[in-house]
């Protein structure tokens, strides 16, 4: 417990020193460090994307894609912050503590990215997804069990490297922890997972999405895996830069989500325009039908629901609020014509696609009888079964026929 508290203190102390240094540079009008600027911009970009898509998820509450992306972007921004603080670390204790706590956002990022691919691209083998999450969780647990962290058994010293512009950054030199292979294995499986998902999406015919999301992820995961492994095993002396490859993955995923949102907005505009045009067309048809004293009707055959105009209701004597169906219509058809109408409808079902005409009598609620002429057609579904019918009705004569 004391070790964890000490690690926390090292993180916060380093963070405080980075902030104090930035403030002192601002006060003395000294140009801000380009390292601080670049890594801060990395974090700010990720945090901005996380906030935007968290708001989108909050508004829609549909699915997990936007929430998973927000978690991944938030974690990528946190990784950039830890990298910046570790480059400014002055002691091995501070560096080890920062590296230890950086494993938490790495775990969040990898888990979020894996399930983002599963839900968004609908690709990637499920057993690989669970294996990656399991190994990464094991790596996180081991990270907090070992001192100073999963990557190093011991950080012997910090090498202060001179970069362009007079920048000095800290890089770790130490003894690698063999258990770091657990974390590296999870990254290797993540790479295989993305290769498999990319192939699946490509074969599905969505080459653009396969290249943007899958191709970018494969490239940047390879870059992050290679750079971190070379630093841990002492092949190169360098700070960790995995935040920028992770930024590339987040940017590719964010681009695709933004593209989808833009397409959804365009489709919504087109739908509204077509809906307005449809309403205008319906208004014109109703106006013409009313002028000709026609009543329009639409019959959903499967659920026996009739949608009718006000003129049709007046013709048949129904109130505005009364629900309509073919069964209800048959009740007011004259008994002598009822069986003939049933046979006609059955004939329409058997020979869907043609147009039909009929004349029959109805008995209105006031007891009067009226001859009605009907014109309509039946349309079938993809299986050839009658789906709906539409047509017009009009009174043949204002008084009953003898």
Image: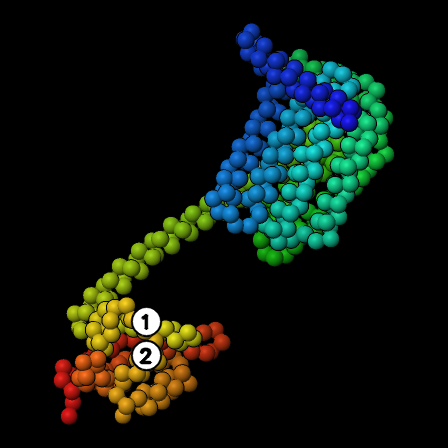
Residue 233 appears in the picture as rendered? no
> Against 87, is 129 above or below?
below
Q: Position of residue 278 (x, y in %)?
A: 31, 60
Residue labelled with disc 1:
323
Picture quadrant of residue 163: top right
Residue 29 appears in the picture as rendered? yes
> Against 85, is 385 above or below?
below
- Pointer 1: residues within 10 angstroms few (<14), some, or many (20+)? few
Give the structural element (helix, strand or loop) at label 1: loop
Identify the residue shown where x is 77% and y is 20%. Answer: 93
Cα separation, mark 1 vs mark 2, equals 9 Å
Q: Quadrant of the N terminus?
A: top right
Q: Position of residue 76 (x, y in %)?
A: 63, 33
Do the numbered discs 1 and 2 sit on residues whose CB atoms are within 8 Å? yes
Left or right: where 272 falls relative to 197: left
> Against 351, is 272 above or below?
above
Residue 328's label in the rendered image is 2
Q: Residue furthest top?
A: 28
Query: How many discs appear?
Result: 2
Identify the residue shown where x is 26% and y is 88%. Answer: 334
- Pointer 2: residues within 10 angstroms few (<14), some, or many (20+)? some
Q: Position of residue 401 (x, y in %)?
A: 16, 89
Q: Quadrant of the C terminus?
A: bottom left
């Amino acid at each position: 417990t004391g070790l964890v508290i000490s690690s926390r203190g090292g993180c916060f102390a380093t963070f405080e020193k980075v902030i104090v240094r930035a403030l002192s540079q601002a006060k003395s009008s000294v140009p801000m460090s380009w390292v601080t600027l670049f890594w801060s911009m990395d974090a700010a970009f990720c945090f901005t994307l996380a906030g935007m898509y968290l708001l989108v998820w909050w508004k829609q509450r549909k699915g997990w894609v936007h929430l998973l992306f927000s978690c991944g972007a938030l974690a990528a921004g946190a990784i950039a912050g830890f990298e910046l603080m570790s480059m400014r670390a002055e002691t091995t204790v501070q560096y080890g503590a920062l590296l230890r706590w950086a494993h938490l956002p790495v775990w969040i990022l990898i888990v979020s990215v894996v399930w983002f691919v599963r839900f968004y691209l609908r690709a990637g083998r499920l057993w690989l997804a669970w294996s990656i999450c399991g190994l990464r969780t094991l790596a996180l647990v081991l990270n907090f069990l070992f001192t100073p962290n999963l990557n190093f058994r011991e950080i012997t010293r910090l090498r202060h490297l001179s970069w362009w512009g007079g920048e000095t950054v800290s890089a770790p030199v130490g003894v690698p922890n063999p258990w770091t292979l657990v974390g590296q294995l999870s990254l290797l499986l993540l790479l295989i997972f993305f290769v498999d998902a990319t192939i699946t999406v490509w074969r599905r015919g969505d080459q653009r999405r396969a290249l943007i999301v899958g191709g970018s992820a494969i490239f940047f995961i390879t870059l992050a895996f290679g750079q971190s492994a070379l630093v841990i095993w002492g092949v190169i002396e360098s700070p960790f830069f995995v935040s920028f490859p992770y930024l590339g993955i987040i940017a590719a995923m964010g681009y695709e989500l933004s593209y989808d949102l833009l397409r959804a907005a365009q489709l919504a505009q087109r739908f509204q325009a077509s809906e307005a045009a449809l309403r205008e067309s319906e208004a014109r048809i109703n106006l013409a039908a009313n002028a000709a004293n026609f009543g329009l009707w639409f019959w959903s055959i499967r659920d026996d629901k009739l949608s009718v105009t006000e003129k049709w209701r007046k013709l048949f004597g129904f109130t505005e609020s009364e629900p309509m169906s073919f069964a209800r219509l048959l009740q007011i058809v004259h008994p002598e014509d009822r069986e003939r109408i049933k046979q006609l409808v059955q004939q329409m079902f058997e020979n869907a696609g043609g147009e039909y005409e009929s004349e029959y009598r109805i008995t209105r609620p006031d007891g009067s009888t009226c001859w009605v002429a009907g014109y309509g057609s039946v349309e079938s579904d993809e299986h050839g079964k009658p789906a709906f019918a539409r047509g017009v009705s009009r009174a043949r004569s204002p008084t009953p026929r003898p």
